[in-house]
Every structure is written in structure tokens, then in C-alpha cells.
Amino acid sequence: MGSAGGPGAGGSTFTVLVAAAANFGVALAKAVAGVLSGSTAMLAEAGHSVADTMTEALLFVALKRSRKPADEDHPFGYGPERYIWALLASVATFVGGGVFAVYDGIHALTHVEKPGDPLISYIVLAIAFVLEGLSLRTGWRQATGRAEHFRVPILRYLQHTPDTAVKAVVMEDTAALIGLVLAALGLLGGQLTGSGIFDGIASVLIGVLLIVVAYVLGRANTELLVGRALPKPMREAVRRELLSVDAVQDVMELTTLVQGPGEILIAAKVDFRDVSTSAEIEWACEEAETRLRTLIPAVSRVYLDPTPPRTSPPPLPE
């Protein structure tokens, strides 16, 4: 969650553009190779790259629209809008890549044909592997830079980060490299046996891989759209920080909300010490906000509600 600064911050747009450029070029090459060689796995891979290109386009829109500043009609900003577009991107991966590849693979298995010359497909797969690897390296560098900044393992960062654009690029490029290997194995199996069944199997496996990736990304974006709190250890740290303020007696209710990368809202019902003056309560609120922003630089809004303890009787009328 951390902050909006540090290594790798602000690089999501560049990462997405690199991935989009690589996938667009690869999609065209795969499609041509698939038509010329008659390889179902290559056509599935072409569909995979088209879906990834659509995904990156939607992620680019998400990044741009989510950075609009808050206004009177949207006082909390447009941060959550990135998850709407990112969710649409995962649907594009599911339908445009996964379902197409599975359907094409099943069709190949039920209508087995003799495979054509795989040479051009091997060449395209090798070039695609290099391009996808370069794209993955860009996304991986940004992700590792952020993970090191927050001092957490890279896999834990990818699991919990609200920057789903980088998460999507890393997962999709990883799936793309695995898909390329599966396509190559399908071509090799067809070349050695003279049967197109291996090509069909490779296509189905590529489709299943894409469906899994789409599900993971879709679920992550859905959680953030619905409203995800800070992880429990961070919530406990927030509570301890509030209790460390001299005028604070107790924190009776704590609500946290991740609105986007670098956008965390904290609201709490706080019992201030009865001897505190109104001025002391005001300064205590300022101190609490400063402490929380120091603890978690991504905190953008802090709301504290002075609330009497639940067991206290209401004051008697004068």
C-alpha cells in the first residue's frame, strides 16, 4: 500500500504502453504464422495477444481517468474508476483470449488435420518470446522496485498491491511466455507425429491458462471496487498510532478503505480524555493525522469522530 513515491512509482503508464506495443506486433505476426502453417495453437496465441492488447488499452484508459483530480461532484476523486476499466480488461482476457483458445482447441481435436510447415511459426514464437520477455522485464522491474521500497517480498506485493495495472501486466506477460512454450510444444508434437492433436491440446491449455489469469485479475479488481480495507497488521498499526496521541483515551471503531494506489482513507470513532479542552482535541486530531501520514504515506484522508464511551451515561440536562 505504502506511498505514491519511491522506486517504480508513476511507471505504470510506461509499463502498460510497452506491453501494448509488444502485444500488438506479436498478435499480427502470430496471426500470419497461424494462417500460413495451419496451426491452431498459433491462432490461439494470436487471440491471446489480441486479448492482451485490448487489456493494455483498457488499462491505459483506467490509468488516465483515475488520475482526474477530485471535484465538487466527486469529492473522493476518481481513483476507483481504474478498477472498473481493469475489470473490463480481465473480461476481455477471458472472452477474447481464453474462451476463443479453448473453442479453437476443441475444434481442432474434433477435426484433426495434418499440420503444415511449422518453420515460420517457430520463428514467430522465438521473436514473440523475446518481445514478451522484454515487456515482462519492464513490469517486473517496476514491481520489484515497489516491493523493495515497502520492504516486502515481491509475491506479497503483487498479491496486495492496489496498482492492478502493473499486476495485470506481470501476470499476463508471464502467462504469455508460458503460452508460447505450450504453442511450441504443440507444434513440435505435430511435427514429430504428423498429427494435429498436439496442436489442439496446446490451444486448450493456453485457453485454460488465460481463463485462470482473467479470474485472478477479475477477483482482485472486484475486491477493490467493492471496498477493501488495509491488511490486519496495518489496521493494528493505525490503531496503535492513534492511541499514542496523549489526548486519545480509546479507539472504539476504526474503518480503513483502499481507494487506489497512494489513496487510503482512515475514519475512526475516538474517545478523547474527558479533561481535554476543545483546543487540545483539535490539536490531537492534527497530530493523529500527521502520525498516520508518516506511518503510511499513502494516507490521503483522515476523519476522526469524537465519541463518548459506550458505557458512559448521557449528560443530565441543566
Image (cartoon, grey):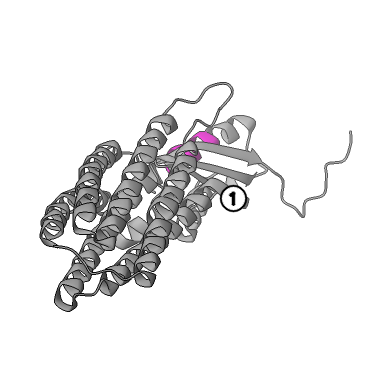
User: Does the image show residue 267?
Assistant: yes
The residue pinned by badge 1 equals 254
The amino acid sitting under disc 1 is Leu
Q: Nearer the viewer, residue 132 or 277?
A: 132
Front residue (pair 279, 297)? 297
Residue placed at 40% from the left, 56% from the top?
100
Asked if residue 72 is among those painted magenta in the image, a careful observer would answer no
Q: Position of residue 235 (x, y in %)?
A: 50, 55
Q: Residue at x 39, y 68 (%)?
A: 106
Q: Quadrant of residue 316?
A: top right
Category of crowding for the residue at label 1, using alpha-carbon neighbours closer than 10 angstroms: few (below 14), some (14–19), many (at least 20): some
Q: Residue at x 20, y 72 (%)?
A: 190
Local SS, label 1:
strand
User: What's the magenta region?
Assistant: 284-291
Question: Which quadrant holds the C terminus?
Answer: top right
Taking the spot 39% from the left edge, 71% from the top edge, the residue there is 110
Furthest residue to the right? 317
- Residue 285 spot, x, y in % from top left: 54, 36
List x then y, in percent, for residue 8.
24, 43
Residue 162 as seen in the image, left or right of residue 47: right
Q: As drawn, which residue projects farthest toward the bottom?
A: 193
> Would you say the magenta stretch is mainly helix, strand or loop?
helix
